[in-house]
Image: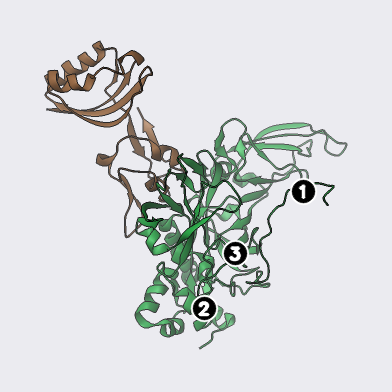
Chain colours: A brown, B green
Amino acid sequence: MARKRLDLTFPPRQSLKPIIYHLVRDYDLVPNILRAQIHPAQEGRMVLEVTGSKENYAAGVAFLEAQGLTVNEAASDIVLDEERCVDCGLCTAVCKPGALTLDPETQTLRFDKDKCVYCEACVIACPRRAITLTF
Amino acid sequence: MAKSWEEINARIASGEAVVFTAEEFATLAADEGVKAAARRVDVVTTGTFGPMCSTGVILNFGHSDPPIRMAEIWLNDVAAYGGLAAVDTYLGVTQPSSTRGIEYGGAHVIEDLLRGKAVRLRATSPGTDCYPRTEIDTWVTLDDLNQAYFFNPRNAYQNYAVAVNTTDSVLHTYLGTLLPRLGNATYCSAGVLSPLLNDPTYRTIGVGSRIFVAGAPGYVAWQGTQHNPHTDRDSHGVPVRPAGTLAVIADLKAASPEFYSAATFTGYGVSSFVGIGVPVPVLDEDIAATLALTDADLTATIYDYGVAGRSRPSLGTVTYAELRSGSIEVEGKKVPTGPISSLPRARRIATELKRWITEERFAIAEPVELLPQPGSQAQKPLEITTREAI
């Protein structure tokens, strides 16, 4: 089984096609959409996790590319620089999924990456620029 | 059981002083009563580490050969003030870089200097008979400077607003990103550890107080700008809104990047986190009673930053204990909260100041002049007028 995070860019003409449906039906992949910004007639972007067999994963990615999507397999990652962080907690105010929280006792910052949906709100909010999106 | 400043300083000098942080003192007072806590403890240390925009440094570069009377000055492309003597300047933290905008500003130059990095100094001048040079382009480090000291016109705000946004759009403010339709609330105070919340009527904190500034020993120089003692107070005399402020001074060369951090607020500008710690002597039970207050006793007022005017409507009050719990209720809606002032750093500052007093015998100083007292002055607005109207 493979579990990978993909960063997909949809060309404008593909935004209306049920791409994810085909990933499920034709390739038996389980998608977990973390973030999507799709507008008709505009370029779209989607970050998703897919789980499935290695063969199906490879075939699924080939399908996506054949549809004209740009597939970034080494998908972007949110990284917290603990040296720069001053534990002000401001990022926790914009983190809707609750990936960034303050320890109730110490009030120091905790980052639970499993809850992160890569919305990047914290990247913009952090006054220390301690949270970055890496590729 | 009143204690004098002299008695407390004698105990500090002999290493016998009992020093607690404000959090520790509040716990002690809750357990043993204010009276017993007041008898036992000599000094309570406070601390705060939040963004403070009215912060900056006075620098003297020394004279080049031939010398220059610097009129326009840049440090790493951040403009510094050229209206002082030939090679003196004031660098304010909010000044953005002319090349990198708000991602790098005066605050970042100060942090780079504190970290020992070389900073590019450029200056121009019309040239005079006594200062013939018209331009200079060189590099300086903190060690190279003759004098380098913080002179911060407004630090350590006594209480602050809780910011929310009732509009339909995201707002980028100096209190962080405010999500639409009461999507979050941000607040900025060390609460139980905040210096001026522990001495709400400025009995012991005044001009000449010896304090902790960004890791360096420093002083309260004057009342801070916008010092407004004339504001609403609770039954303990503690302001429920932004009130008193401190102007502080301290040697940049003795400061530490552990207690000073540059900041950028997206859509707003540059600022810097400044660590301020103030020792409060436990002179009597009255001051002990306010030192004993906890986050559950301290109140802040919620303001709607969606109103882009001077007078933002208040949407009620909350305690710091409620704010720290992670959510508050505003207009019947549960709103998640996030702080801006770092409590872990504030704790570190109060603990470090405690170490200064107990181990390094850091003496406390009675104010040579009190700050303007409650009832003495209110904050005046700026009215827009014309020469004719005057």
Instruction: Tell me the CA gap for discs 1 and 3.
Output: 28 Å
Q: SS of the residue at dot 2?
A: helix
> Which residue of the protein is positioned furthest toward the bottom in this rendering?
B1
What residue is drawn where x is 44% and y is 38%?
A124
Which of the two labelled residues, at mark 3 and mark 2, occupies the earlier sequence position? 3
Give the number of the disc on residue B244: 3
Q: Which residue is mark 1?
A: B385
- Residue B326, how many percent across, how many down? 35, 55
**Residue A32 x %, y %:** 21, 31
Query: Which residue reaches farthest front?
Result: B332
Mark 1 belongs to which amino acid? Thr
From the top left corner, tell me how far across and down residue A115 is, in percent. 26, 41
- Mark 3 — on which chain does it sit? B
Spatial CA distance of label 1 from label 2 is 44 Å
In the depicted structure, whether residue A43 falls above or below residue B235: above
Say what amino acid the circle numbered 2 marks: Ile
Compared with B222, A66 (above or below) is: above
Chain of the residue that carries numbered disc 1 in the rendered image: B
Residue wearing tag 2: B287
Is residue B17 at least partly visible in the picture?
Answer: no
> Residue at (40%, 68%) from the top-left corner?
B296
- The quadrant in which residue B351 appears is bottom left
At a point 55% along the width and 83% down the height, the residue shown is B7
Query: Mark 3 against mark 2, which lies toward the viewer?
Result: 3
Dots 1 and 3 on the same chain:
yes
